[in-house]
Amino acid sequence: MPTLQLTDESFLTTAPSRFSETFEIARPAADVWAELINDTPLDWCRALSIKWTSPRPFGIGTTRTAKVLGALMVKERYFIWEEGHRKTFCITESSLPVFNRVAEDYVVEPLAPDRSRFTWTLAMEPKGIAKIGPGNKLLVNSLFKDTRKHFSA
């Protein structure tokens, strides 16, 4: 699989393509965090299938694989891990040469004992065919729509 350029935290704000959504959720922050690190994270997103490839407990250096739209396979490595609050990874390898760099950031904040805020940021530098057309935006919008639906149920 082709290797991508590694990123750091600054890429989350400097990437050529950046998408972010904040969800206010009527559930405790600990419950939201637990769903984000369960054995099938983001299983409510129809376009994703994710598997952890590192043993628990998770932290900096944790890895996982993701299949996107049933066709694109990527390997991910976490470079920020603040247990119960924040986790950030970059894609290290991709089965298709459509990105130079990609990072995702998940932040969960308590608002009240039974309310929380989840902010999901995706930062990417597409290349080749991925630079053309609305494909990335459509994919990310579907992830956010599925997440909104999941947490409002």
Image (tube, rainbow, N blue to C red):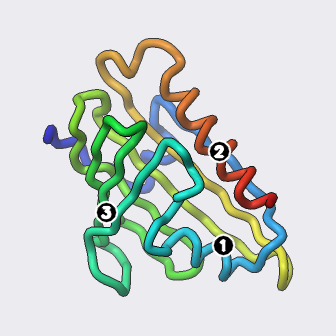
Residue type, label 1:
Val
Q: Residue at x 37, y 39 (%)?
A: 70
Whole-angstrom CA distance, mark 2 to mark 3, is 20 Å
Q: Residue visible at 28% across and 47% down?
A: 74
Distance from disc 3 to disc 1, alpha carbons, whole Å, reads: 19 Å
Q: Is residue 39 above or below residue 146?
A: below
Relative image position of residue 121 (x, y in whole percent): 56, 49
State left or right for residue 138 relative to residue 101: right
Give the residue type at disc 2.
Answer: Phe
Which residue is painted at 43% across and 45% down in the image? 11
Asked if the residue at tag 3 contacts the one at tag 2, i.e. Cβ–Cβ closer than 8 Å, the answer is no
Label 1, residues with CA under 10 Å away: few <14, some 14-19, many ≥20: many
Residue 10 position, x and y percent, is 44, 50
Q: Earlier in the sequence, mark 2 or mark 3?
A: 3
Q: Residues within 10 Å of mark 2 (few under 14, many from 20)?
A: some
Compared to residue 6, the image places residue 41 above or below, namely below
Q: How many residues crowd around disc 3 within 10 Å: few (fewer than 14), some, or many (20 or more)?
A: some
Q: Secondary structure at mark 2?
A: helix
- The residue to which callout 2 is attached is 144
**Quadrant assignment for the N terminus:** top left
Query: Label 1, on which residue?
Result: 32
Q: Secondary structure under badge 1?
A: helix
Query: Quadrant of the rendered structure where residue 128 is?
Result: top left
Q: Looking at the image, is 148 positioned above or below residue 110?
A: above
**Which mark sits nearer the N-terminus, 1 or 2?**
1
What is the C-alpha distance between the residues marked 1 and 2? 15 Å
> Percent x, y for residue 149?
74, 51
Location of mark 3 (residue): 64
